[in-house]
Amino acid sequence: MHPATAKWYDRRDYVFIEFCVEDSKDVTVNFETAKFGFSCLGGTDNVKHLNEIDLFGAIDQNESKHRRTDRSVLCCLRKAESGKAWPRLTKEKAKLNWLSVDFNNWKDWEDDSDEELSNFDRFSEMMNSMGGDDELPDLDGAEDGESADSDDEKMPDLE
């Protein structure tokens, strides 16, 4: 048995793990509160894959799910404590050679705090309440080749 190659990324309410196994069959996914298990047969030669992970944090096993495609199996683990970042997938800081961070899907969601979003809303309200013309100036008078600038000169043709 070989562990399947996997990539993972963290979001506010979920942790996603994608097992990169093409043509997987007999997929079994076990969601436990602090542990996660994955097994399948993969490839044309039906290699048996088995992965077991002691998770960094607790998950809601009833709200966690997985989806199989021809190229991979994507597992969506619902965090028991939403809004808490997971700095790693595993409980221990050990480096697993079959596991890597999925930087293509990684998003630093911690920077999107509610306070910053409310600051943006206040800024938007302030900009909207400032005086001045509500409408943009009418640009219908400017036609394709003509401009209101008096210093514009016709450019010579390229030879």
Image (cartoon, grey):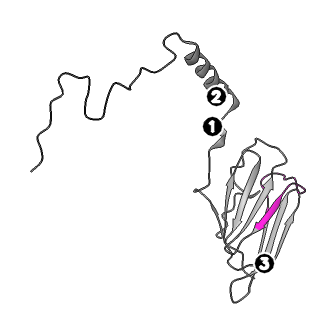
Tag 2: Cα neighbours inside 10 Å, few (<14), some, or many (≥20)?
few
Measured as percent of width and height from the top left, residue 25 is found at 78, 80
Q: Is residue 104 shown left or right of residue 51?
A: left
Measured as percent of width and height from the top left, residue 129 is found at 58, 13
| Above or below, 68 relative to 80 | below
Check disc 2 and give the amino acid type.
Answer: Glu
**Closer-to-camera residue (121/54):** 121
Tell me if label 1 and label 2 are in contact, CB under 8 Å.
Answer: yes
Sooner in the amino-acid sequence: mark 3 or mark 1? 3
Q: Is residue 134 shown left or right of residue 23?
A: left
Q: Residue visible at 19% across and 21% down?
A: 150
Q: CA distance from mark 1 to mark 2?
A: 8 Å
| Above or below, 44 relative to 9 | below
Quarter assignment of residue 51: bottom right
Q: CA distance from mark 3 to mark 1?
A: 37 Å
Query: Label 1, on which residue?
Result: 111
Sooner in the amino-acid sequence: mark 1 or mark 2? 1
- Magenta stretch? 53-67
Q: Is residue 124 shown left or right of residue 151?
A: right
As helix, strand or loop, the secondary structure at mark 1 comes to: helix
Query: Label 3, on which residue?
Result: 40
Q: Residue visible at 64% across and 24% down?
A: 121
The quarter of the picture where the N terminus appears is bottom right
